[in-house]
Each structure stands twice: as C-alpha cells, then as structure tokens.
C-alpha cells in the first residue's frame, strides 16, 4: 500500500489516493526516510543527477529502493549505490522491465529457444516525441542517451540476450524547434557484442504525434537461421525462419509488471529474473555512450 509521499504533487495521485487519510504527505525527503512505516522508496528524483545520492540515503536509512532510469549518471555513483545495497542488505533495483513487456517477452523467448541460430546482428530504435518541456539541462532527466536510448540498450542485452563489449556514440542538437540549445535531438550508436555479433542503436526526440504511439520503437534480431522483429511501437511483429514466414508472434502471454516482480522478491515469493549486474549493465553502457558522444565532438 502507499504509505507516504514527498516532493510529489497531491493532484498527480490517482483520485482514490488523493484524499486517503492513511497516506502521509511529508514536507521533505528526509522526513519520508524517517517514516518508520515506509519500507520501500519508489524514487524518481526531480534532478536525476541527484538520484544516486538519494538512493544511497534511502538504503542507509534501511529502505529498499526501486529507482527510475538512469539510476546513476556516472560509473562511480553506480558503484557506490551497488556497494551500499550490499552493505545494508536492502534490495536496490532499477525500473528495468522492458524485456518482460510484450512483445519483447515473446521475442526474448524466441531468442532463448535457439531457433534463430547464432545471433549476428541486433538493430534497435527508441523514439519519443519532442515537446517544449524537454529540459536542455541533462542533469534534470538524464538526457537523450541516458533516459531514452537506455530502452534500446535493454532490447539488445535483455531481449536479444547479447552483452555489449564496446560501443561508439554520436549525438546532435540539430532539428530542435525554436533553434539551437543544449537539448540533443538524435543519437546513434555502433556496438560490438559478445560472440562476435554487432549491433546499432538509434534514439531520438523525432517521433511525430501522428504515429499514435508515445514511445515509437523497433527491434530486429537477426540470426544465422532466421530473424524476429517488432516495429511500429510493438504493433507489428514477425518471425521468419529460413524460407518460412511464420507471421506475427503469439502475444497472448501477459506482460509482467517489473514492480510486481520486485515486490514479490521482497516478500520472498520469488526471486528477481536477473542479477543486479545484468539489470544495470545497460545503465553502465549508456553512461559510457554519453562519454563517447562527448569525446566525439
């Protein structure tokens, strides 16, 4: 149940909770951490640059933490969060459920079945629409690479099942409505993957509203024996093995809510489906991708 909130507008809550007398509205984050009835902090910091430090504060206060992406914006902070979770025994996890939502859950099952043969190439895109409130200061939300492209990196590592070994990234401010600013509008990455595979990622704020999908995205996984793809924001899927087009994937299995999985793990009902290192590997790689893009200027 929701016990308390801080730094969160009351009007943003669902109507059923807005006037619930059992929900406490704390004046500060420190007051929230001091609340003995709070066991888990769902953390989405107003400035994402501060989020790692706030996660560490919560862990040291004995709270489990479920953090928005990116959970840290440099590798030193990421290492400190992981170390603090190990020291305190509290469960830290990032909101990293991409691979467990449809159609990616079904695509992941296809890859794990081995029917595609040796995975050779992975091509992923994540596209959001531009709007006037996108902050040019990347410390606010993590920026294009760290808060948008991370979805595509998860598609590569968590869906296609291929860990990244190296990458190069470039990004541009071109195309922003209203002129130039610090807001990056598009980024591209070239990847080398384990087992000799290669990959590419595109991320941008160029999704036209006419697509009808907020997070327009695509994923193609190509193997020696076939390919599986999702396009148009998950509205189209296709599996082709050799000369046989098997058509759309079976998506009848429901998406799995990663927060529910996290809560079940806390309650001892089940374990997490991946290790913390596997979960945070995409975060580590988008941090490195941002450094790569900065060094390419």
Image (cartoon, helix red, strand yellow):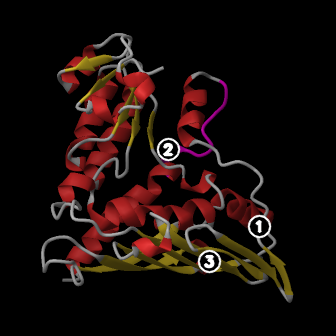
User: Which element is circle 2 on?
Assistant: helix
Q: How crowded is mark 2: few (under 14 residues within 10 Å), some or many (20 or more)?
A: some
Q: Residues within 10 Å of mark 3 (few under 14, many from 20)?
A: many
Residue assigned mark 1: 249
Figure disc tally: 3
Q: Where is residue 106 in the image (x, y as percent from the top left)?
A: 72, 60
Residue assigned mark 3: 220
Q: Identify the mark nearer the N-term, 2 or 3.
A: 3
Extent of the magenta region: 269-277
Q: Where is residue 177 in the image (x, y as percent from the top left)?
A: 20, 78
Q: How crowded is mark 1: few (under 14 residues within 10 Å), some or many (20 or more)?
A: some
Q: Identify the mark nearer the N-term, 1 or 3.
A: 3
| Circle on res. 276 | 2
Q: Position of residue 68 (x, y in %)?
A: 37, 45
Residue 218 shown left or right of residue 241 in the figure: left
Q: Nearer the viewer, mark 1 or mark 3?
A: 1
């Amino acid at each position: 149940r929701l016990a308390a909130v801080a730094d969160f507008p009351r009007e943003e809550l669902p109507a059923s909770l807005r006037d619930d007398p059992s929900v406490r509205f704390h004046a500060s984050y420190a007051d929230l951490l001091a609340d003995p009835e709070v066991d888990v902090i769902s953390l989405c910091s107003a400035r994402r640059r501060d989020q790692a430090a706030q996660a560490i504060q919560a862990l040291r206060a004995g709270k489990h933490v479920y953090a928005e992406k990116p959970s840290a914006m440099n590798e030193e902070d990421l290492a400190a969060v992981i170390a603090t979770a190990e020291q305190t025994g509290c469960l830290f996890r990032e909101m990293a459920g991409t691979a467990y939502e449809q159609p990616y859950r079904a695509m992941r099952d296809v890859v794990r079945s081995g029917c595609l043969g040796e995975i050779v190439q992975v091509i992923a895109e994540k596209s959001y629409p531009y709007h006037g409130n996108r902050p040019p200061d990347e410390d606010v939300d993590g920026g294009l690479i760290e808060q948008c492209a991370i979805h595509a990196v998860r598609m590569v590592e968590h869906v296609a099942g291929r860990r990244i070994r190296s990458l190069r990234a470039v990004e541009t401010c071109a195309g922003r409505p209203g002129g130039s600013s610090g807001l990056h509008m598009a980024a591209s990455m070239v990847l080398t993957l384990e087992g000799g595979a290669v990959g590419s990622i595109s991320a941008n704020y160029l999704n036209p509203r006419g697509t009808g999908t907020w997070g327009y995205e695509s994923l193609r996984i190509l193997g020696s024996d076939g390919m599986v793809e999702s396009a148009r924001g998950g509205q189209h899927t296709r599996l082709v093995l050799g000369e046989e087009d098997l058509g759309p994937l079976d998506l009848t299995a429901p998406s799995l809510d990663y927060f529910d999985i996290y809560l079940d793990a806390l309650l001892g009902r089940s374990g997490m489906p991946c290790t913390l290192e596997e979960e945070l590997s995409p975060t580590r790689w988008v941090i490195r991708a941002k450094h790569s893009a900065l060094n390419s200027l």
